Amino acid sequence: MSAPDDDPDLSRVLDALDDADCRAFLRALDEPMTANELSEACDVPLSTTYRKLESLTEATLVAEETEVRPDGRHRSRYRADFDAIEVAFDDGRELTVEIDRPPRGPSERLADIWSEVQRET
């Protein structure tokens, strides 16, 4: 996955935050979880969970990481990718969104690179 946009799409962020299932996922993501784990924790059907995770990922509120396993059966884990979200009117009275991101360590950067390699192959 590439680095999150510095200027996320306002409508995607607001659409994701307006969705009750998406908000439940964000509350549940204290630590990275698989789609199955989120589905069970939030009592949301798995097919819906994947759609909501895609929406959250496109809004840059959730990041997908690949968990590399020794048996070769890698799996995706999802984590909340923000510390704070601010929606405000700018000087021109236009709505803006600003997302404060947590600091990214070497393991997160490596996971991003691995996810991008998998996506391109």
Image (cartoon, helix red, strand yellow):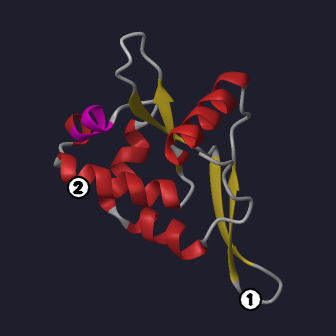
Q: Secondary structure at mark 1?
A: loop
Residues in magenta, as a range: 35-39
Residue 18 sits above or below residue 50 on the image = below
In the rendered image, is residue 23 in sight?
yes
In the displayed image of the protein, which residue is found farthest to the bottom? 92
Q: Residue at x 54, y 52 (%)?
A: 61
The 10 Å Cα crowd at callout 2, few under 14, some 14 to 19, many 20 or more, is few
In the rendered image, is residue 31 in sight?
no
Residue 70 sits above or below residue 94 on the image = above
Give me the disc on residue 25: none
Which quadrant of the structure image shows residue 105? top right
Q: Position of residue 9 (x, y in %)?
A: 61, 71
In the displayed image of the protein, which residue is found farthest to the top? 70
Which sits in the foreground, 98 or 62? 62
Q: Position of residue 65 (x, y in %)?
A: 51, 34
Query: Which residue in the protein does label 1 denote?
Result: 93
Q: Amino acid at mark 2?
A: Thr
Q: Residue at x 69, y 73 (%)?
A: 88
Q: Position of residue 36 (x, y in %)?
A: 25, 35
Which sits in the foreground, 89 or 110? 110
Query: Which residue in the protein does label 2 denote?
Result: 48
Find the distance from the CA under tag 2 to the CA under tag 1.
Answer: 35 Å
Q: Secondary structure at mark 2?
A: helix
The 10 Å Cα crowd at callout 1, few under 14, some 14 to 19, many 20 or more, is few
Q: Give yes or no for contact between labels 2 and 1 (Cβ–Cβ under 8 Å).
A: no
Q: Residue at x 57, y 55 (%)?
A: 60
Please, what is the dominant secondary structure of the magenta stretch? Answer: helix
Residue 34 sits above or below residue 51 on the image = above
Going from N to C along the chain, the mark reached first, 2 or 1, is 2
Which sits in the foreground, 55 or 66? 66
Q: Position of residue 103 (x, y in %)?
A: 74, 34
